[in-house]
Amino acid sequence: ADGSVPFFWGTDADGNLVLSDEIETVTKSCGKSSAPFPKGCFFTTSGGLSSFEHPLNELKPVPRVDSSGHVCGATFKVDAEAKKESTG
């Protein structure tokens, strides 16, 4: 949750989610879609990406742009106005 353990994620060419504590593994499989896993967040297959501090709020993706101006992923911010839909 505090980001003290490095963790990375990305999407491979087949659309599979790749997670690892080794950046080389994710970069090799995912190329530019690889990124550090968002600090303070967790992921579940039923709820997707959520914030530890604000699990009922949606997370808003903010595009990440590389040095040549191409979008190469996203960082995530808690959207204080948007609540997740209840699944129960």
Image (spheres, rainbow, N blue to C red):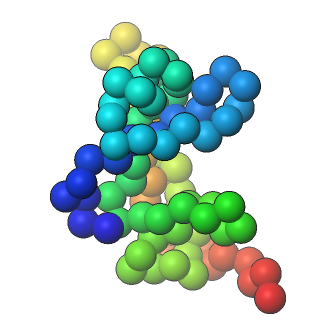
Give the residue drawn at x 54%, y 38%: 18
Which quadrant holds residue 12?
top right
Residue 79 left/right relative to 25: right
**Is 56 placed above or below 50 here?**
below
**Is 85 placed above or below 66 here?**
below
Q: Quadrant of the N terminus?
A: bottom left
Identify which residue, 57 or 42, lies in the foreground: 42
Residue 4 left/right relative to 74: left
Whole-percent x and y of residue 50?
52, 68
Name, please, the residue furthest toward the bottom. 88
Name, please, the residue furthest toward the top. 68
Give the residue drawn at x 66%, y 68%: 47
Identify which residue, 73 or 44, lies in the foreground: 44
Name, please, the residue furthest toward the left. 4
Whole-percent x and y of residue 37?
40, 48
**Is 16 placed above or below 7 here?**
above
Query: Is any atom of residue 72 visible in this view?
Result: no
Query: Is any atom of residue 38 visible in this view?
Result: yes
Residue 44 left/right relative to 70: right
Which quadrant holds residue 88?
bottom right
Identify which residue, 15 or 70, lies in the foreground: 15
Whole-percent x and y of residue 2?
24, 66
Which quadrant holds residue 27?
top left
Residue 27 left/right relative to 82: left
Identify which residue, 62 or 12, lies in the foreground: 12
Whole-percent x and y of residue 57?
55, 76
